[in-house]
Image: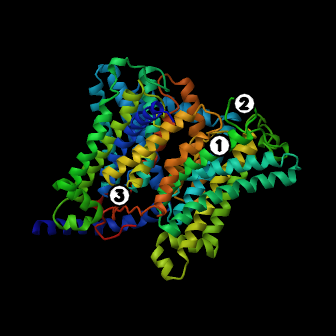
Amino acid sequence: MSGQTASFLASSAVRMATPLLLAALGGLYSERSGVVNIALEGLMLAGAFTAATVTHFAHQPWLGLLAAAGAGAAVALVHATATIRFGADQVVSGAAINILFLGLPPLLSGALFASTSETPHLPRGELLPRAPVVLAALLVPFTWYVLERTRFGLRLRAAGENPEAVASAGLSVERIRTAAVMVSGALAALGGAYLAIGQASQFTRNMTAGRGFIALAALIFGKWRPFQTMFACLLFGLAEAVAIQVQGAAGVPVQFVQMIPYVLTLVVLAGFIGHARPPRSLGLPLEPRGGGR
Amino acid sequence: MNAAQGAQGGWQRAGARLAPALARLKPWADRLAPVRAPLLALLAAFVAGGLLIAAVGDDPIAVYGLLLGSALSWPDGIGYTLFYATPLIFTGLAVAVAFRAGLFNVGAEGQLYAGAFAAAWVGIAGGGLPAWLLLPLAGAAAVAAGGAWGALPGVLKARFGAHEVITTIMLNFIAVAIAGYLTAHRYQQPGDAILETRPIGAGAHLARLGALVPGLPARIPLNLAFPAALAACGLVYLLLWRTRWGYELRVTGANPDAAAYGGIAVGRQLVLGMAISGALAGMVGINEVLGYRYRYYDGFSAGYGFTGIAVALLGRNHPAGVALAALLLGALVRGGLFVGIFAEHVSRDLVLVLQGLAILFVAAQRLPRSAAA
């Protein structure tokens, strides 16, 4: 492999890793607080559509980015309300949001722009090709600091590991988890926004194509820790970059390169490479009568 | 404190007076109880969807009329509604059986791809065989491949404690990738621009109902897989509620600790439950490959595996409920096509929105924590 190819692959891998990293860090806040978030895919789609649409009308990509984060937090609030307040199963609620946001953006796009498959192209000057990459990189140490060195982080982790203790200390587990899930939604939506107004120049139907699930895989592969999750995202981003690179080459089975993230995650889950231990109370609602699953 | 107690006493007195009236109503309420939650969720989803339709500038009544009217016309509406319902019955049953075993199978999508590819593979490899041999073989291949793909996360859970939600999501992508690889490198017609296999042998074709039901044109792809799906509902009912194994599976799902204490091999139940679930999802391949396209086709599933979650939840994880919910969602898929064509602003994506909302509402019907405490 020539040096040129290597540097091209590296920069391509970083670009591919960025939406994964934003979404995976989002998932990290939610899951470390004890709420499963398989809705990352739907949240990313909500962010991608919002960013493209707001940027189209306002001609301000930063406004688009901000609106995407807001939309993500709002959708995540639905997930938080359903699961934390109404006791809906966290996986079921996440699956519902994924289906809902497979449909809602194209429906709105059809109503607004008379095309259910895409929003209008944005001019080059209204895109943000670099800023989200930098933002994602900065969010890694920031997330580590928040989780390990701040009171909010301590409470968030406690809500995920030992919610009964948090509750008996007089703190509201519901409120901590709701905040964590909303942060999660905002970050995942930023990941989707980067796809629409960073990598591409529009929203297209189902443009995340499973990246929310790869982000979830990266989170598990990274054992729910910020820096390890970043390395997982870079690895998975590299796999995607290689898959694109070999797409045209004859004789290279591109499907096997695309499979790498999923197979690696299975291997980690089966305990062959270290053991991935989820937060102790992940997926368990705080039951007043000590129930749970 | 005293005021609170007084208020409580007042409520109790009022309750005592109301009790006889409520007792008379209770048998009726009980009879409706199993369907109340799904019906409320559907109603709420349609109301919210109606607001959305109005918000984008269409008339909700007209759109819903179009949706249901085009799904219930004879023969095309009903024929296609039943055809679209067929894979949803299979995936709904798959998710429901897993739920009964205490497992959340998000992997029906991957299992149905495994089943469909296996059916096509046998149908191509045994292309020269007579129908009486090839058709059962291809059908069995779909069941076996789906079952094996389902058993895998069962093993990963029983043996390594890996959560089935995550492993099944990963296995979905892996199934599509492997089937895509095999299609492209082994079974694609040379020069074909579409990622699909060669056609299966004529002996593996499943008869269309149009050939059997008078008045139903043969161009409608509704085939024998539909009655097979209804039969599968019956079999699942018998299995879960009329056999010892089904009893053990349900006990495992309801309370694994109690099941283990009672001498049930929980790990084995998990693997078996997932295998049955996967086998049911694999049967989608019978409808899709043997009864409709006569080949494997990359990306053929319109999210049937995920819609199966909605079907199972709306059907309350009961085979009869699954059949009803699948018919309803099949009607929505059929009607959605016409909404997409004839409504001014709303597209067929409305069906996905209604589905997502219905799942959310049905899931959120456990009482609010404050009310439960």
Q: Is residue B245 above or below residue A96?
A: below
Q: CA distance from mark 3 to mark 1?
A: 42 Å
| Mark 2 or 1, closer to the camera | 1
**On the picture, is B305 further left or further right than A7?**
right
Residue located 57% across and 74% down the image = B248
Q: Amino acid at mark 1?
A: Tyr
Q: Which residue is mark 2?
A: B192
- State whether residue A38 appears in this view: no
For disc 3, the chain is A
State the mark number for residue B83.
Answer: none
| Mark 3 or 1, closer to the camera | 1
Q: Secondary structure at mark 3?
A: loop
Q: Which residue is mark 1?
A: B181
| Tag 2 near tag 3, CB within 8 Å | no
- Tell me if mark 2 has few (under 14), some (14-19) or many (20+) residues whose alpha carbon lies within 10 angstroms of its own: few
**On the picture, is B211 further left or further right than A47?**
right
Looking at the rendering, which quadrant does residue A233 occupy?
A: top left
Q: Amino acid at mark 2?
A: Asp
Residue B196 is situated, as x and y percent measured from the top left of the image, at 70, 37
Residue located 30% across and 24% down the image = A61
**On the picture, is A226 further left or further right than A93?**
left
Q: Which residue is mark 3?
A: A87
